[in-house]
């Protein structure tokens, strides 16, 4: 099995069948795109400055700090609802992409309608599969989440005072920091290995999830059978799966760096205007340009490249299954 040949075949399918791009853009719009960029702008303020600037959303943050429980419950329920909708749409789109690539391999042509019909029954089981593969990482990260909540709670009152325009005295900050700093290094020493292990495990399980999703869509097996078959294929082809994951990460990183360079130049004056609420005609125009740039690059081009990732994973999966069949036949003979 030649990985470079598989990559070229996937690229050929991706370029010839541009209807696949639509599904990648949909996946990106709903938050599961595999390409993007980020830019940040921060400002620091002198210690003696009273409070924080009158930033957008300041009143909402003050209300949150005054009574956080209803906001936490409401945000959690809203996040859960949006996540369910997002996952169903994205996995329906992914199963459609997988089915369309399979049609192209078998028949030489495809259509979005046929792909949607083939994939519409797969969205809920694929969402369940993604949850199962995410659970081990979530469990490992629980101590880090608990540590973050504890750390945030210690600064709860101090940040509330800053929002209200009250700067804590140096004595108050020292009283706050001393008991925390005595334990923070020990906490990081314990939590960092868990975060590192969780990150590596999450990435590897994500690769296994991609293989298992293709087993489920193309082989029409149950969830449990798909997991067993996906593990069997991944164990026998670990090198190619790992190589593909690394190649796509490299492409994604290059995309992110290249896209972020012009975005940063546009974003800095917009961020300053947003923070200080000091808008001019130039900053408004730049804000519109930034929005268009994000839509074209992150959503448009990023979505198109996300569809290529799906095509490549499907082609790799089909090549791995063909190889395994050939090996089994050779052993049988």
Image (cartoon, grey):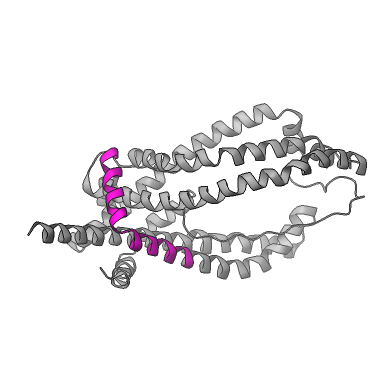
Position in image of residue 180 (x %, y %)? 77, 40
Query: Which is nearer the eye, 24 or 312?
Result: 312
Image point (45%, 42%), residue name? 134
* Residue 298 shows in this picture: yes
**Left or right side of 134 for 289:** right
Viewed as shown, does residue 193 lie left or right of 215?
right
Q: Residue at x 62, y 44 (%)?
A: 190
Q: Is residue 164 above or below residue 282?
A: above
Q: Which quarter of the figure has residue 248?
A: bottom left
Would residue 68 appear left or right of 31 to someone viewing this image?
right
Q: What is the magenta segment's predominant secondary structure?
A: helix
The quarter of the rendered structure image containing the N terminus is: bottom left
Point out the stretch of residues depicted in magenta: 223-250
Horizontal side, residue 323 vs residue 26: left or right: left
Furthest-left residue in view? 333
Q: Is residue 204 magenta?
A: no
- Residue 96: x and y in percent read 31, 51
Tell whether position 234 is magenta: yes
Residue 110 appears in the figure: no
Percent of width and height locating residue 21:
38, 60
The quadrant of the picture occupied by the C terminus is: bottom left
The residue depicted at 48 percent of the width and 67 percent of the height is 250
Q: Looking at this view, is 14 or 254 the one in front?
A: 254
Q: Residue 75 appears in which quarter of the rendering?
A: top right
Q: Nearer the viewer, residue 250 or 95?
A: 250
User: How many numbered callouts?
Assistant: 0
Tell which of 224 and 259 is nearer to you: 224
Q: Residue at x 29, y 38 (%)?
A: 224
């Amino acid at each position: 099995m030649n990985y470079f040949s598989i990559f070229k075949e996937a690229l050929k399918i991706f370029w010839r069948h541009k209807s696949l791009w639509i599904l990648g853009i949909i996946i990106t719009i709903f938050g599961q795109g595999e390409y993007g960029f980020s830019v940040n702008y921060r400002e620091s303020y002198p210690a003696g400055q009273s409070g924080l600037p009158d930033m957008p959303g300041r009143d909402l943050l003050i209300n949150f700090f005054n009574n956080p429980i209803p906001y936490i419950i409401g945000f959690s329920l809203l996040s859960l609802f949006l996540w369910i909708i997002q996952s169903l749409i994205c996995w329906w789109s992914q199963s459609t992409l997988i089915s369309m690539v399979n049609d192209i391999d078998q028949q030489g042509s495809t259509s979005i309608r046929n792909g949607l019909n083939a994939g519409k029954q797969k969205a809920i089981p694929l969402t369940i599969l993604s949850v199962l593969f995410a659970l081990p990482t979530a469990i490992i990260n629980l101590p880090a989440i608990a540590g973050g909540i504890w750390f945030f709670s210690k600064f709860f009152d101090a940040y509330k005072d800053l929002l209200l325009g009250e700067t804590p005295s140096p004595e108050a900050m020292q009283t706050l920091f001393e008991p925390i700093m005595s334990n923070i290094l020990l906490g990081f020493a314990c939590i960092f290995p868990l975060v590192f292990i969780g990150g590596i495990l999450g990435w590897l399980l994500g690769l296994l999830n991609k293989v298992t999703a293709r087993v489920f869509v193309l082989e029409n097996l149950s969830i449990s059978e798909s997991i067993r078959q996906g593990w069997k294929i991944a164990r026998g082809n670990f090198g190619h799966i790992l190589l593909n994951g690394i190649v796509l990460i490299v492409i994604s990183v290059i995309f992110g760096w290249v896209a972020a360079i012009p975005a940063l130049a546009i974003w800095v004056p917009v961020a300053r205007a947003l923070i200080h609420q000091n808008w001019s005609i130039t900053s408004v125009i730049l804000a519109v340009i930034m929005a268009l740039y994000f839509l074209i690059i992150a959503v448009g081009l990023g979505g198109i490249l996300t569809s290529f990732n799906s095509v490549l994973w499907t082609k790799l999966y089909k090549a791995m299954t063909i190889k395994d069949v050939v090996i089994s036949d050779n052993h049988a003979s």
